[in-house]
Amino acid sequence: MTTISKVRYSRRSLLKSGGAAVAAAALPAPMVWGQETKDITLRQFGTGVSNLNDVALKVKEDLGFNLEMTALDTDSVTQRAATQPNSFDIADIEYFICKKVWAAGNLQAMDTSKIAQYDNIAGTFRSGLLTPESTIAQGTAPHTVGFTSGVNGKDFVQEESGWMTLIPTIYNADTLGIRPDLIGRPINNWSELLNPEFKGKASILDISSIGIMDMALVVESMGEYTYPDKGNMTKEEIDLTLGIFTEAKKNGQFRAFWKSFDESVNLMASGEVVIQSMWSPAITAVRSQGIPCVYQPLEEGYRSWGGGLGLSASLSGMELDAAYEYINWYLSGWVGGYLMRQGYYSAVPSTSKEFMSEDEWGYWYEGKESKGDIVSPTGAKLAGPGEVRDGGSFLERMGSVVCWNSVMDENQYMVRKWNEFIAA
Amino acid sequence: MERVHRSLSDARRRALALRHTETLGQTAGAGLRNNTVIGWLLAAPLALVLVVFLVLPIVMIVVVSFWGATEWSIYPAFLFDNYEFLLTSDVTYRVFFNTFKYAAITWAFTLLIGFTVAYYLAFHIRSLTWQIALFLLCTIPFLTSNIIRMISWIPFLGRNGIANSTLISMGVIDEPLEWLLFSDFSVVLAFVHLYTLFMVVPIFNTMMRIDKSLIEAAVDAGATGWQTLRHVIIPLTKPGIMIGTIFVVALVMGDFITVRFMSGSQSANMGRLIQNDIALLQYPSASATAVILLVTVLILIGTLLRLVDIRKEL
């Protein structure tokens, strides 16, 4: 505990007791026993993908305390996690961000013995193996930055140490999104992103750690180069990769670059772009507008990512307990089911299953034909009876992952080169 | 006789004035220190605000521009790396060129439109009520936010947007025009839309203060409308044009969000470089870019101010 966080704690307690006094004077409520947790507010921030107001509402209903959500783009999330430790209690971040910011010391390690569902967390996040026979994909795989040596650990350890950096919640296999109605032919390879046929109608995301991996997949698919390790490129490999894309950019291949997921939705829905890097809920969002959009499985495989919840280093006492309670609730299934119905995978699939209908579980997880309409968590129709999820079952999709979003040894060089690519 | 009398009284007046100043000088001797102290005290609040909110942040930016950065933090140092990387990359020069290009084109259009609107308001509308009413009309778009005004162009200009579908249905074009959106065209269009008012206001203001009898004199002397404009109105409007220019140039050079949205992140200016650096936690590099941008804009504005003595006109 540092002095700063103590000051913050006392200021908040002061505000709380002030608020409670006002509330008590106004409403002499009988529920005295719940009063203390009721006044707790946890501030969570993360990308738009899982910072959902529905979750905050459900937390209030189930646990009684308040959850304040702030949705930011990926770079702003990294920035906040690294530079503003007192602005949040819970960080909903991706594992590659964790690799970047863990050493800054703004997050505290989490005791896995306090996590009820720890044993049910998917293997990807613990041993790194999806199934005992799997090979581990290139890049920053979650288990490599998922554990630290102890409560105050600043390092990463490769075994299940009992101290987690993030508690995993969500992951998925990403690929290119396409507009089948505007393309009119099958798309099977990453190289199609730079196909001159789609000149002025392609897009890639402007988030370096993710974009560089999409680029690497395209470069390999074009047959230009095969990386020894896509997730840890040398300077020459970075130059080569960005060189190919800079040339394509100058030739007018790209319509736009996007940074937040709603931008990608707009580009796709308006028809400005017909092929681009995309995230699963963006596909869902385009489809729920009645516009055909496919999350196209490609021969070379998927780029994957995982996210989890981290605790601010300054959390302590009652708020820390509340945060653990919240994380245990998060893994207990309701949120998992919600996220699965958006096309993500929950880190604890067994609990999520209880919050999904058999048909939903079959469609989203097992890759089976749907029996009835498949609707999004907000009620929009995503698929009719007899449809199959793009890419099939969980094992087919996650089993074809070839790389993870990455932070490389040469990351700073890559970032500068990326900036030049965007400016070129 | 009368003339002598007048010159006498003139002399007396001068003498009186002289004596008056002397008296003032004597009393001031005691009050001088007091006045200086009061003067300083009066200036202090503003000076303090400026030091804390303007000078200190800029000093901080300059200092940080020499620091080093890791993935997640910055550390004090005295390095020239940031400047070296910036000044040796040809991307920087291209981005600089782009920044100036946007500023120049936007300036030309806002000046042309701004001057015309101001001229119409100042010289063609006779009643003050109408002038005020029409002037307020010009400001109505400014009741919504900058970003909304900018973003609303996107669905309008898009491939399947209103502009393209209208042109197609009118038979003007067969294929949608791709360059309408996410291009230099859309960036400049948004800039002109956003910043023309900053040109209209100062030009209108100086035009309103032009003595109408000067124009009458020009007309009486046989000048054509064009000559009056060229030799009377434009020279007298220069300070307004200059103030408007400073507004527009400073706004366009410092912008990042318009370029980002209207070019679909395809083009860059200096502001975008800074924004990208900040997003990637490279604060020292962002500071170095900011310092160079600041110096450039200051030199530019310094040059502009040499052309017209604004202080004289205000």
Image: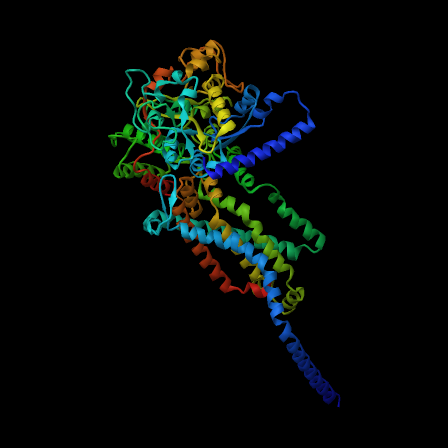
Residue A382, above or below B95: above
In this rendering, the count of numbered labels is: 0
Q: Of B203 and A26, which appears nearest the observer?
A: A26
What's the coloring here? Answer: rainbow
Question: Which quadrant, please, contains the C terminus of chain B?
Answer: bottom right
Q: Of B94 and A22, which appears nearest the observer?
A: A22
Picture coordinates of residue B7 (x, y %)? 70, 86
Q: Of A323 and A355, which appears nearest the observer?
A: A323
Picture coordinates of residue B291 (x, y %)? 42, 52
Residue A121, above or below B235: above
Q: Which residue is drawn at 58% across and 27% down?
A: A39
Task: Examine the rendering and report whether any part of residue A180 can be seen.
Answer: no
Q: Which residue is drawn at 62% across and 47% down?
A: B139
Picture coordinates of residue A72 (x, y %)? 48, 33
Q: Tell which residue pokes out farthest to the bottom in this image.
A: B1
Q: In which quarter of the image is residue A403?
A: top left
Left of A102 or right of it: where is A379? right
Residue A86, above or below B40: above
Q: In which quarter of the image is residue B31?
A: bottom right
